Amino acid sequence: MENLSDRKKRFIMLAIMSAMLFASLNQTIIGTALPKIISDLGGMHLYSWVFTIFMLASSVTAVLVGKLSDLYGRKPFILIGIGVFSVGSMMCGFSNTIIQLIIYRGIQGFGAGMIMSTAFTVVGDLFSPRERGKWQGIMSSVFGLSSVLGPTFGGWIVDHSDWHWIFWVFLPFGAVAFLMIWKLFPYWQRGVPQAVDYMGSILITLTIIPLLLAFTWGGNEYGWGSVPIISLLAGTAIFFVCFMIVERKVKNPVLPLHLFKNGVFTISNFLGFLLGAGMFGTIMYMPMFIQGVMGASATKSGMFMMSMTLSMVAASAIIGQLITKTGKYKLFALSGLFIMGGGTFLLSILSFDASGLRVISNLIIVGIGLGIAFPIFMLTIQNAVSHDYLGVATASAQLFRQMGGTIGVAIMGTFLNYSMKAHLASGAKLSLGPLNMPSGLRKKILQIQDPQILMDHSRLSKLLVSIPPEYKQPVGQLVVSVREALDYGLTHVFMIDTIIILCAALLTAFFLKEIPLRTSNQPARPSRER
C-alpha cells in the first residue's frame, strides 16, 4: 500500500479518519455527561466502571485484532468494528440502570478496539516512518477534535435535553464512515492465511480481566488484602505464566514475545502505559472537579475541557510536522511530558474557589504537553519493528496505553473514594452531630453526603429549598463540607497524575534510545525480529 498514488492515499486516510472520528466522538462525549447520568441512574460506586469496562474491552480487542489484521488484512476488521460500535452506542441510549449502561459500554469497547487498532496500523501501511510523523499528528488532531466536540455536545445535551441522546447523535457518522471504507479501502491480505493462536488469545484475555477487576475493586468494594483481591491477582499471575509458556511454543503467537527483546519497543510501550494513565486520569476526573467542586454546569464543564483539547490539537499538528521535517523525536517527547506534568501539578493545587480563567490556563498547559507527547510513542514502536509485525506492534501500543488508562483511573478512583470518606466523616459529624432533628429529616439531609448530588444542580436546589429555615445554616455547612471533601480527594488524584507523568519523562530521558526514522517500509537489512 506504500506504493499507492498520493491521491488514493489521501482518500483512504479520509475514510479512516471518519471512522476514528465516529468512535472517538462517542468515547469523549460521555465525559461531561457522566455525572448527570450517574445522578439519574444511581451507582456512584460504579462511576469508574463505565470507563473501565470500555477500556478493558477495547484493550483486549485491540491486541487480538492487531495480529489478525496482519494475517487477513485491515478492511474486514475496521468494518466489523464500526458495526459493533454502532450497535453498542444504540443500546447505551436505551439503558435504564447503571449495570445495563456498563454492559453496553463494553460492547462499544469491543468495536472501538477494532477501529482504533486498525486505524493507526493503516497509517503505517500507507507511509514510511519518516512520513508518519505528520500523519500521526493529524490522527491525534482528529482525536483532539472529537475531544472538543464530544464534551461540548455532551454538556449541552444533558443541560437542555435527555442524556440518552449523547449515544445516538453521532450514529450517522458511523454510517458514513462505514460506506466510505467499504467503497474506498482496497481489499488487501498479507501473505497466506495461517493458524490463529486461540489459546494465546484466551489466556491474554484471562490475564487482563482479573488484573483490571483487582485494581477496580481494590480499596472500594474489597480491601487490598481481602480474599477476592488476592485471588484475582493470583489468577492474573497464573494465567500470565500460562500465556508466556504458550506464546513461546505456538507458531503464530498473538503477541510475539521476541518483540520485547527490542529495547525501543519495550520502553515505548511502558511509556505509553504511563501516558495513558495520566491522560485518562485528567479527562475523567477534571469534569468532576468543574461540576462537583466549582458548581459549574455540564455545558460550562465542556467549554473548560475544550481549552485542553484545542491546545492538544494544535500541539499535535505542529509536532507531527516537526518530526517529519527533522526526523527527531526524543527531545519533543521530553518537552511534552515535562509540560504536561507541570500542568497536572497546577491542577492538583486548585481549590473549590478557583477562578475559571485559572482552570482554563492550567488545562491549556496540560493539553500542550499531551499534544506533543501523544503521537510520539506509537511512532517509535512502529519504527522499531519490521513491517511484518506492524499490526501486532501497533495493537500492543494501544493495549499498553489503554491498560494504563484503565489501571490509572482505577487507582486514582480508589484514592479519591478513600480521601473523601475520611473527610466526609468528620464533616458530617461537625455539621449535623449536635442538632436535634426528626430522623426522617436527618436522613433526607444526609443525602447531601453523596457527592453525585453535587453534579445534579437541579436536584440539589430542590433539596435545599425543602429544608426548614432553622436547619438551612448547618445544611449549608454540610454542602460546603462535601465540596471540600471532593476537592480534597481530587487533589490526591491530580498529584498521582503528576508523579506518573514525571516518571515517564525521566524514563524517556534515560532509557529511550533515539534511532533514525526509516524512509521506507522495506527494511534495508533483515529485521532483528525475524
Image (cartoon, rainbow, N blue to C red):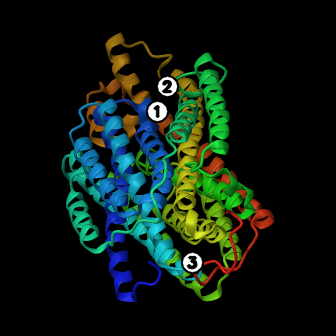
**In the rendered structure, are the residues bearing label 1 and label 3 in contact, judged by CB atoms less than 8 Å apart?**
no
Question: In the visual, does 112 lie left or right of 357?
Answer: left
User: Toward the viewer: 46 or 210?
Assistant: 210
- Residue beneath the point at 39% across and 47% down: 109
Mark number, residue 477? 1
What amino acid is found at the position of numbered circle 2 in the picture?
Answer: Ser
Asked whether the viewer can see residue 296, the reply is no
- Residue beneath the point at 43% across and 32% down: 46
Element type where label 1 sits in the image: helix
Tell me the distance, in whole angstroms, between the alpha carbons under discs 1 and 3. 64 Å
Residue 495 vertical position relative to residue 336 in the rendered view, above or below: above
User: Toward the viewer: 110 or 142?
Assistant: 110
In this rendering, which labeled residue sits more in front, label 1 or label 3?
3
- Residue beneath the point at 35% across and 50% down: 111
Q: Which residue is mark 2?
A: 431
Res 514 → quadrant: bottom right
Q: Which residue is mark 3?
A: 521
The picture places residue 161, in percent across and down from the top left corner, at: 18, 50
Asked whether the viewer can see residue 184, the reply is yes
